[in-house]
Amino acid sequence: MSPGGQGALGGDNRAVTKRVDFAARNTPLQPIDHLAEAVGLPAGRLFVKRDDLTGLTGGGNKARKLEYLVADAIFAGADTLVTSGAAQSNHIRATAAAARAQSLECVAVMSTLHEQHQPHQPEGNLILDDLFGVQVVWCGPDDRDGTAAEVERELKAAGHRPYVIPLGGSNALGASGYVTAADEIEVAVPGATVVCAAGTGGTMAGLAVGLGSCDRVIGVDAAALPDLSERVLGLLGATADLVGRPAPSGQIRIDASQAGAPYGAPLLEVRDAIRLVARTTGLVLDPVYTGRAMAALISWCRTGELPDGPVVFLHSGGIPALFTQRYSRWFETPRRFGDAPSAK
């Protein structure tokens, strides 16, 4: 079985006809007029695609990818899912939930910036990972691929049947889950531009293939990887071939305005965007991905750079990260009873 989670593809597109149902499809698509008003847009211009409601304990965009990846793992006869990510990885948490839902084991290669690769404090997604009984292998930030390959070899030597899922679930098979999401968006808001956070590129590539146009998808770089553009470009053709659709037209659109700070670093404009969304919509964004994407979108609204026509913001989940010390302290704003709440 080859690393990358495509061991059962066999050179055709049969894998995309197989999926495990994690209730990831047909998520609500809702107008968010109060937020639109707060950033100077008329009612009916701004919508949110609620992929924070896709299931797998906390929802998020990974559930759509895992429907196909886990189905392929089962088809290949795997007994263990192996994947990788950062310590607070939403992808690892969702993969662990998917594994347990299908009676599979899960091994996670987690990178840490701590000296000597010391484990992080149990909080946020790490608590959920522990509940699912994930076997964690810690490594440095540049050692994930090599460590995952070593884990795969060791599991095989011990008689297991591992299936390696790439970082973020972002290969052609995983990205095909967002072709379906694009179809849902096109039915609900035809012709809309879709704004999404972009980490490993699979979600953005799948949306572009589904909509048939790179021009209609704007990915906001979350600074997860240095080669995001190359990754998205590499996924576009492979995903289109896999699902039997034409390669999307146009040029990929990646906004790097929020990528100047390191991955996951608290940014004041992101904190303000999360607060504004919470106080105008009742929705909660995360500080690593969707918060950065919304900060960029709000900036475009206020500077007149927003594309014409309706805009759909993809809420790709990630809330558990808010419940870590790194971010909970960042949001501390003591208020006395009777103080007027602010939407800014």
Image (tube, rainbow, N blue to C red):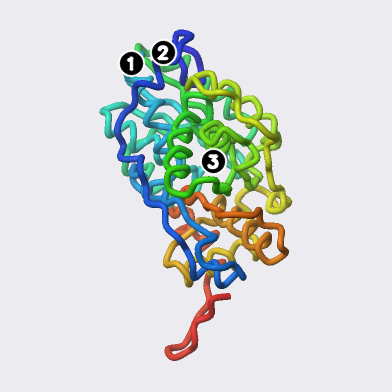
Residue 25 at least partly seen: yes
Image position, residue 27 (x, y; %): 37, 47
The quadrant of the rendering that contains the C terminus is bottom right
Give the foreground label among 3 and 1. Answer: 1
Residue 150 at least partly seen: no
Q: Nearer the viewer, residue 130 or 175?
A: 175
**Residue under circle 1?**
75
Q: In the displayed structure, does residue 163 sit left or right of residue 132?
A: right
The local secondary structure at tag 2 comes to loop
Q: Residue farthest to the top?
A: 10
Q: Disc 2, disc 1: CB below 8 Å?
A: yes
* Quarter occupied by residue 82: top left
The local secondary structure at tag 1 comes to helix
Q: Amino acid at mark 3?
A: Ala
Could you tell which of marks 3 and 2 lies nearer the N-terminus?
2
**Residue under circle 2?**
8
Above or below for 148 versus 257: above
Report how far apart the C-alphas of labels 3 and 2 lie in the structure: 27 Å
